[in-house]
Image (cartoon, rainbow, N blue to C red):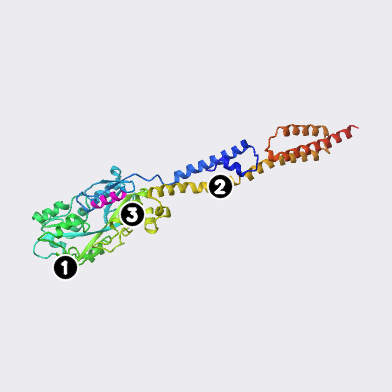
Amino acid sequence: MLNAEFVRKRLPENIEGRALAWYVVGVTASLLLLGWGLARLAPPPPPKRVIMSTGTEDGAYHRYAQRYRELLARHGVDLVLRPSSGAAQNLERLRTGDNGVEVGLVQGGLVLETDSEKLVTLGSLFYEPIWIFYRGKSVIDQVSELRGQRVAVGIPGGGTHALGMAVARDNGLAEPPTALVELGGLAAADALIAGSIDAALYVSAIDGPAVQRLLRAPGVHMMNARRADAYIRRLPYLHKLDLPAGVVDLKAGLPSQPMTMIAVTANLVAREGVHPVAVELLLDAARQVHGGPSLLHRAGVFPAPMDIELPLATDADRFYRDRPSLLRRILPFWVAVWAERLLFIMLPLLAIAIPAFAYLPKIYDWRIRSKLDGWYAELNRIERAASVGDPTAHVERINEIDVRLNRVKVPKAYLSQLYTLRLHADYVRGLLVAQREAKVS
């Protein structure tokens, strides 16, 4: 901030320091008050810790979150992972803010309309196909054909369980003789391979550990979603995907034929008010993890504001629309973040401070001249009134003014004007004395 010494150099020479100091103090106090207000409006300091609800420790959600944590750690941010039973529990934690959870992975189709009051989406990260694996020699291509069998639908609190129960109800599997088993993850895969259950439903990324195991398990088959169009028409948050023959493993020929799949998207959901820096870091990490090509999509598809069941966070929208700022491109991350915050505060201050201090010499000059002009006006009134009043009274008034002028302190640069004023006061006094003597004689 500009100081008094800098301002003194811009003022006319020999200006009285005490009067100048009052001006500097006043302007500085105003700028400090404005700076305090801007600091309150500026985004809060970047967080050093973000808490994320993930999923089961053997699932894809948790594995992806571990990669996010590594990327955020490079910028000095600790991404604390809270394992959960799955997407449904993640969503519930976000609703309540349980254990300080700020962000979480939530699959499409789980949110309620009322969630938009507290939650925002940062975008979709990847497809999560609905995988249905079954045992047996006969080909099954409709979920209803699993009636009467033992079907694993995931553990309560997980996204697989929520969607699996909905699929089971729609296909008449929610009542006996069908047995819906609350089992998921690798445990369900092991049970299917061992023959303890007849089928298992998953909502998982293609590289999920359980999915990868079952794709290669002998005697286990993947169901082809021949009714994909019907599901998508009934549930708009679903997507239709094509899995070419051999795309999973060319050598083993997996899958052995083209497969049609339906999928939801995994979305990064946050509580409203999440810090802008946390949003940018998480989306940047997601772009590094999910931005490349996969067996289900081409490069550059994710992350994206694809399924907007919740309002898109303002900072996420800015991330998708704009390139990183110039400061972010040329400076280290934390330096750029603090520089942007300081610029938010300092630019308005400088926009006011520079003109204020630049015009200070003119303001001070106006103040001195207005005082001297006031005395001149007073002398002029006395001179005009002397012709009709008592000259003696006016002489006494001139004498009082003269006494006061002797006590006036002005900078040396204005002394010539003060002495000129005194000469004019003597001149008016001489006129009044002459009028008084003329009346006496």
Instruction: Identify the residue at horizontal 59%, vertical 46% (top origin).
Output: 358
Of the numbered discs 1 and 2, the one sitting upstream in the chain is 1
**Residue numbers of the magenta segment:** 63-72
Residue 181 seen in render: no
Category of crowding for the residue at label 2, using alpha-carbon neighbours closer than 10 angstroms: few (below 14), some (14–19), many (at least 20) = few
Instruction: Identify the residue at horizontal 56%, vertical 41% (top origin).
Output: 27
Residue 65 within the segment the image draws in magenta: yes
Of the numbered discs 3 and 1, the one sitting upstream in the chain is 1
Q: Is residue 434 left or right of residue 314?
A: right
Q: Could you say which disc has been placed on residue 354 in the image?
A: 2
Provide residue 114's location: percent of width, then percent of height. 32, 51
Q: Could you say which disc has been placed on residue 284 in the image?
A: 3
**Residue 141 position by quadrant:** bottom left
Nearer-the-camera pick, 109 or 84? 84
Nearer-the-camera pick, 256 or 200? 256
The alpha-carbon separation of the residues under discs 3 and 2 comes to 38 Å
Quadrant of the rendering where the C terminus is positioned: top right
Q: Secondary structure at mark 2?
A: helix
Looking at the image, do the residues carrying marks 3 and 1 touch, with CB atoms under 8 Å apart?
Answer: no
